[in-house]
Image (cartoon, rainbow, N blue to C red):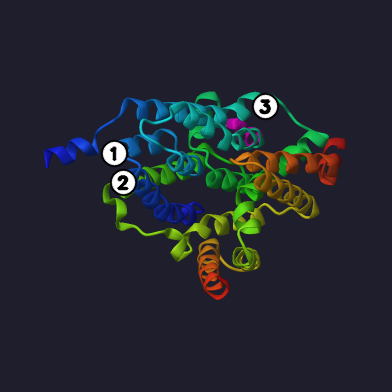
């Protein structure tokens, strides 16, 4: 099985370059926004803009799945939001997943 | 602990990513190296989707940059809340900043101080899970089926929805969410690639600026 082990730990030079490039730009984005603004004390409309970012970014990330995929996903999302007002997070996520499976069976 | 739902949700995705990567010819060690250094789920899924041999490293790098542009907004938003960390610990903590840990830090900052150990412990838990399960997935490969058949593809959307509900601060949040959703739908339909994420984030920020500062903030400033 030495060939199997050799394959498992093989690193192709182009693959290494790709991973290094992805790692570098990803870390740059992680520190870039912090570096640019860490000395700033925001107020007024700039602060209001920054305060809107968390919900806006999370919304944008899930928009294709929740609003563009189909009615099953959109309805399951609405149920998930309603459930999250009363239930613990893990239970809510599990309920959302069960809802989407059932709704997909019903609708597609 | 707050990170548990995210840590569990990561498992099926890690296994799947590893399996897909193995199908594209990556070795388990290459998958482990990628997960450990890039540590960004959405960027890695899209990278594996467009992966060919030999690896188109420049395309992969630019694509990762585009998908992760949202980190700029996230880091800027988090900056005032981690000011107490100092520069070195901030550089380490920000390496672990992923959507889930960042959102949990934002949520916590509304109630109490975000500490270095709070942020990095959550990040470390997700990092260990992500590296372990993507590598395992690459090792066991094709044993795993399509996660959409179990609804796992919806797990992260459901998790993010609960995080958004936790960030709700009244109608100003509603306006930001609506602006982001409308712009993200338009960009998703019109343009290939992950432009819709950055576009939605910027649209929400602009909507927040137009809505204007919080009344309490204005009162505090006057006192």
Residues marked 2 and 3, same chain: no
Q: Nearer the viewer, residue B216 or A40?
A: A40
Task: Report the chain holding disc 2.
Answer: B
Q: How many numbered tags mark residues here?
A: 3
Name the secondary structure under disc 2.
helix
Task: Report the chain holding disc 3.
Answer: A
Name the secondary structure under disc 1.
loop
Q: Which mark is residue A37?
A: 3
Residue at image position (64%, 56%) is A68
The quadrant of the rendering that contains the C terminus of chain B is top right
Residue at image position (65%, 27%) is A38
Q: Nearer the viewer, mark 2 or mark 3?
A: 2
Q: Is residue A10 left or right of residue B42?
A: left
Region in magenta: B78-84
* Residue A107 percent coordinates (x, y): 58, 73
Task: Report the chain holding disc 1.
Answer: B
Residues marked 2 and 1, same chain: yes
Residue at image position (85%, 45%) is B215
* Real-space CA distance between mark 2 and mark 3, rounded to the nearest whole angstrom: 39 Å
Q: Nearer the viewer, residue A105 or B214?
A: A105
Name the secondary structure under disc 3.
helix
Q: Which residue is mark 1?
A: B27
* Real-space CA distance between mark 3 and mark 1, rounded to the nearest whole angstrom: 39 Å
Q: Are marks 2 and 1 in contact (CB under 8 Å)?
A: yes
In the image, farthest residue toward the bottom:
A106
Q: Which residue is mark 2?
A: B138
- Residue A54, relative to residue A87: is it above or below? above
């Amino acid at each position: 099985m030495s060939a199997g082990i050799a394959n498992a730990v093989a690193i192709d030079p182009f693959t290494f370059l790709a991973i290094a490039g992805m790692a570098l730009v990803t870390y740059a984005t992680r520190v870039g926004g912090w570096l640019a603004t860490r000395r700033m004390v925001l107020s007024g409309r700039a602060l209001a803009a920054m305060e809107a970012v968390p919900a806006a970014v999370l919304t944008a990330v899930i928009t294709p799945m929740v609003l563009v995929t189909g009615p099953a996903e959109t309805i399951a999302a609405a149920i998930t939001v309603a459930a999250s007002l009363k239930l613990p997070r893990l239970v809510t996520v599990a309920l959302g997943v069960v809802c989407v499976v059932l709704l997909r069976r019903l609708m597609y | 602990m707050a990170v548990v739902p995210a840590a569990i949700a990561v498992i099926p995705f890690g296994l799947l990513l590893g399996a897909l990567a193995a199908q594209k010819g990556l070795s388990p060690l290459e998958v482990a190296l990628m997960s450990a250094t890039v540590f960004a789920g959405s960027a890695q899924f899209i990278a594996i989707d467009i992966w060919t041999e030999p690896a188109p490293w420049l395309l992969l790098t630019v694509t990762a940059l585009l998908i992760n542009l949202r980190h700029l907004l996230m880091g800027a938003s988090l900056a005032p809340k981690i000011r107490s960390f100092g520069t070195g610990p901030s550089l380490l903590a920000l390496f672990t900043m992923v959507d889930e840990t960042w959102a949990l830090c934002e949520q916590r900052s509304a109630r109490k101080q975000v500490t270095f150990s709070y942020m990095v412990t959550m990040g470390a838990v997700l990092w260990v899970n992500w590296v372990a399960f993507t590598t395992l997935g690459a090792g066991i490969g094709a044993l795993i089926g399509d996660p959409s058949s179990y609804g796992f593809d919806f797990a992260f959307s459901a998790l993010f929805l609960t995080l958004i509900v936790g960030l709700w601060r009244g109608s100003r949040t509603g306006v930001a969410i609506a602006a982001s959703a409308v712009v993200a739908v338009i960009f998703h339909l019109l343009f290939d690639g992950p432009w819709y994420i950055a576009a939605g984030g910027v649209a929400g920020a602009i909507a927040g600026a137009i809505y204007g500062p919080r009344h309490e903030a204005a009162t505090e400033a006057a006192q």
